Amino acid sequence: MKKHLYLLMVTIMVTVMSELQVAGMMPAMAADLGVSTGQIGLLVSVYAAGMAVGGPLFAYFLRHAPVKGALLAIVALYAVAQVLVPLVDAFWWVALIRVITGALAGASFGLSVTYAAQLASSPQKIGEAVSIVLGGIMVGTVLGLPLSHFISDRWGWQSSFYVLGVITFALFLASLALLPRAEAATQDAAAQDVRNLRKPSLWARYLVSLLTIGAAYASFSFFTPLLESNAGFSTNATTIILFVYGICAYIGNMIVGKFADQHAVGVLSLGHGLLFVALVLLAVFSDLQPLSLAMVIVVGFVGVTMNPALVTRVAEVGGAGTMASTIHTAVISAGVTLGSAVSSTAMSSTSNDDPSIAMWTGAVLAILAALALAAQTRSRRVETASSQQEAGNISRS
């Protein structure tokens, strides 16, 4: 089973690398396409928008298709879209293709998580299986930006898209040969997957995911200026620290996966608490190198690594269907955008553009996530106690 899960992990890794590749070669793309660096930055935003909006649309139209066939179709289209980017020389055509690739990435996320749930050895192992697949986020984050920068610097930015296109096509062939056959969802199961979206409890859990990921990215997005400007680390040292951060995030993701199925609420409560403390310390003592380094590592262990526990909670009420999983992916993408945007706005409102403000933003979002989780947990306990009391009254009568 695990080799199949690692293949799905590579699928997510490739899409994350593609999302980040533009950030690693902005000046070269801007010069070649005749636009500003800020406009090139929009290519990252439109990719995320494609994931958030287009991913669920693809999932809806593919909800009756076998998971393997649907995923293979998405991966094949993704490979084609990647190699189309360097063949056009107009910015808006590139932007359109990035929207499409973002939508395909969103669908591949949802399908990969659904596939992982089907491949789990038991319902109690879904969180662990999903954690392996979501490890692709951590690996893709570590590799995406530096790899695209390296390729662009030596062979031009177009080569980065060709390389990822070839990797994606190789992934398609490997998936075609190695992934086990998975049955399509029945009409009733597909209909139930859509009906689950009407549950307020599902959207409440989506809210926790939005705030949790928002808290992590509100801070992570500004680690580079914090480490270099505030803590005084060199560029090379910052690169190494971010690499260590990625390794810690991967390890943390696997650890969370081990406990997510049985202790999702406990894992999230602990994660929110540690994330809050680490970000407050980073905000207050950002000029102290040893403490800054230690807290960045803590955020690596407890930030986006809470994903498997978030997925487990969503699956508890929404099932592991493609629609519920893909919309959860869209919510997580929205969390990335929310965290980065709120921090950016907060920093821009000050005169010194201090990145420590982003740490405060992340800490506030972590508290909001903890409060939302606590409210949901308390509500569920009240409902359970009420049901037990009602059952006891019936038995006594």
Image: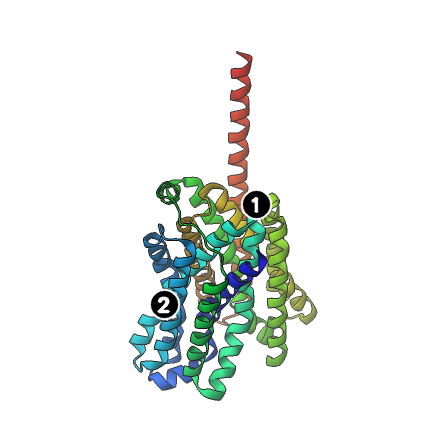
Image position of 67 with respect to 353: above or below: above
Q: N-terminal of the two: label 2 or label 1?
A: 2
Marks 2 & 1, CB-CB < 8 Å contact: no
Q: Residue furthest top?
A: 397
Image position of 314 with respect to 100: above or below: above
Amino acid type of the residue that numbered disc 2 sits on in the rendered structure? Leu
Which residue is located at x 48 percent, y 54 percent? 115
Where in the figure is residue 268, as x and y percent of width and height? 58, 49
Write down the residue under mark 1.
122
Q: Specify few, some or many for label 2: CA neighbours under 10 Å numbering under 14, 14-19, or 20 or more.
A: some
The reply to whether residue 251 is visible in this rendering is yes
Which residue is located at x 60 percent, y 53 percent? 257
Write down the residue under mark 2.
77
Q: Residue furthest right?
A: 290
Q: Nearer the viewer, residue 84 or 373?
A: 84
Which residue is located at x 51 percent, y 40 percent? 376
Where in the figure is residue 150, as x and y percent of width and height? 52, 82
Using residue 192 as the reference point, say whether residue 134 is left or right of it.
right
Which quadrant of the view contains residue 360? Answer: bottom right
Quadrant where the N terminus is found in the figure: bottom right
Q: Nearer the viewer, residue 95 or 190?
A: 190
Amino acid type of the residue that numbered disc 1 sits on in the rendered structure? Ser
The reply to whether residue 305 is visible in this rendering is no
The CA distance from mark 2 to mark 1 is 32 Å
